[in-house]
Amino acid sequence: MNNQLIIDSLTHILPKEFSKLRKSFVQKDKTFESLFSDPKSKIASYVDLVESMQKSSIHKSIVAGFGWNDLGLAKLSNDYILESANKSNGKILPLCSVNPLWGKQAISEIRRCYELGAKGIGELHPDTQGFLDGNDYSSLAEFMELSVSLKMPVVIHCSEPVGHIYEGKGSIKLQVIVNLVSKYPNNIFILSHFGGGLPFYSLMPEIKIALRNVYFDSAAFPYLYHPNVFKVSSIAVGYEKILFASDFPIVSQNHALKKFLRVNLTDVEKKSILKSNADNIYSWP
Ligand SMILES: [Zn+2]
């Protein structure tokens, strides 16, 4: 595994306004409130991320926003991620985030960010954004079509239906996620936090079919699972569907990487999870 190029597929940074004005931003945005009400919850800057990458020998980080409810905060975060990517010499691959329910405003914000270099959309938070409420996702058609036409994967926060509660966990049902990805089979989805355990159900034939264009990142896994989750998921859904991710700054990149490298996987599997799978998704043909 020497000289292996390593990509961390889900990290978060925010401009300083979010820590300075945390209290007022918590009032403005339900998702920010669910994740950052506690003054101890970590907010990292571009400089923090680059330092962490150097320390942990991670070559590239995919940086996402959160599932915003306030357009002003979304733009502030999107601009900061895009500016950071611009000065990073290719170390940062930027995503942008919106609430799909904003309709035309969501579409124009995605287009604006795409022009400035954004490569994907997310992280979206269905619980606090409400875009998967109800049984019909037809109102998301324009958003999903744009994602396909711009070749921007959609990253969605998922929730384990069992286990401990944590800030921002949410309670979106796996069936709801399956319904969404089945409705939009041409989109590429990346389901965060091992998709709330959805990979395990790909042993059901109909779920395997539904997950054809769906990938899973390992964001925050040391906090959620025994590292053998990589092994079990590789068996269930295939190692080519799994992306190594820390969820920095919630989990240290160094810590996540060390835990991952100790998992009993072949070098081919490790290389795919650490780099090639992300390369394939973000160079969507
Ligand atoms: Zn998440």
Image: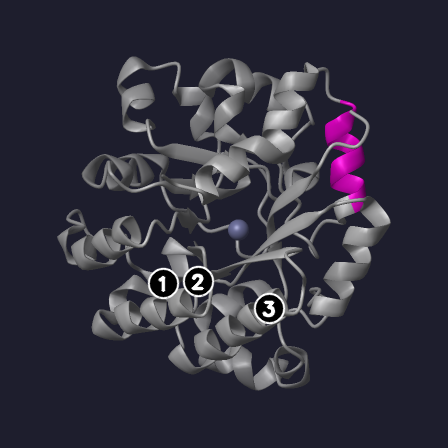
In this figure, which residue is indicated by the disc labeled 3?
86
Identify the mark at residue 67; answer none if there is no mark: 2
Q: Is residue 209 above or below residue 17?
A: above
Determine contact: label 2, label 3, CB under 8 Å: no
Identity of the amino acid at label 1?
Gln
In this figure, which residue is indicated by the disc labeled 1?
129
Does mark 2's beta carbon lie closer than 8 Å to ligand 1?
Answer: no
Q: Quadrant of residue 179?
A: top left
User: Which mark lies nearer to you, 1 or 2?
Assistant: 2
Q: Residue at x 61, y 24 (%)?
A: 230
Determine contact: label 1, label 2, CB under 8 Å: yes
Check disc 2 and report its element: helix, strand or loop.
loop
Location of the N terminus (image quadrant):
top right
Mark 2 or mark 3, which has the lower sequence index?
2
Q: Is residue 124 above or below residue 38?
A: above
Q: Is residue 65 above or below residue 254?
A: below
234 or 116, nearer to the observer: 116
